[in-house]
Image: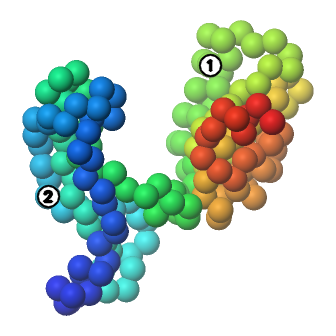
Amino acid sequence: MVSPKTRESLTPISIPIDKCRLCHSGKFVRILSLGNQYVSDFVTSRGGNPRSPLELVRCANCNLVQLKHTFPRDSLYRHYWYRSGISSTMRMALEDIAVKAYGVAKPNAGDFVVDIGCNDGTLLRAYKPTELRRVGFEPATNLVEDAKKGTDYVFNDYFAFDLFRK
């Protein structure tokens, strides 16, 4: 059993928003509160995993539905355990996405395909390397080396258009 003091120290810092992410109004209507839930993690920590509030609100001004709390993105994404390529079902689904996207976009040779949150690069590898330049953005430091295999370039960072332009 985890003591209340230990449990409290495991809680990641969540920041309640005080303004709408779209219109900056400060008026929210609570839609749903699921209380404190486990933060996204695939590995059980000794002594328990951290929990944080999960609350859905609607802006009273513009009606945008959003989470009431935000988290430092590095605490969620700098080390990520799930890998898309380990599941044959996921590989087939991502290959299907690549085929359908190619058919809809009808890219020309040399065009870019960009995968934001490219994980281990499975989706990018589904595109033919001779036709498109495959670029991924992956913040997880433990996934970036796998993502680089069979792709043209991977940024070990969050997506930013300025990085892409380089």
Rendered residue at 62%/10% (across/down): 104
Quadrant holding the N terminus = bottom left
Q: Is residue 35 left or right of residue 92?
A: left
Q: Could you tell which of marks 2 and 1 lies nearer the N-terminus?
A: 2
- Indicate whether 5 appears above or below 95: below
Front position among marks 2 and 1: 2
- Indicate whether 10 appears above or below 140: below
Pointer 2 residue? 35
Residue type, mark 1 in image: Ala
Q: Is residue 8 left or right of residue 151?
A: left
Q: Position of residue 102 (x, y in %)?
A: 68, 17
Quadrant holding the C terminus = top right
Q: CA distance from mark 2 to mark 1?
A: 38 Å
Rendered residue at 14%/36% (across/down): 28
Pointer 1 residue? 101
Q: Is residue 15 visible?
A: yes
Residue type, mark 2 in image: Gly
Q: Position of residue 107 (x, y in %)?
A: 75, 13
Q: Residues within 10 Å of mark 2 (few under 14, many from 20)?
A: few
Q: Position of residue 145 (x, y in %)?
A: 75, 58
Q: Is residue 85 visible?
A: no
The secondary element bearing badge 1 is classed as helix
Q: Is residue 30 left or right of residue 53?
A: left
Rendered residue at 56%/61% (across/down): 78
Q: Position of residue 131 (x, y in %)?
A: 85, 22
Query: Which of the labelled discs sits on residue 120, or is there none?
Result: none
Asked which quadrant contains residue 150, the reply is top right
Q: Give 54 or 124, whichever is nearer the viewer.
A: 54
Q: Mark 2–mark 1 contact, CB under 8 Å?
A: no
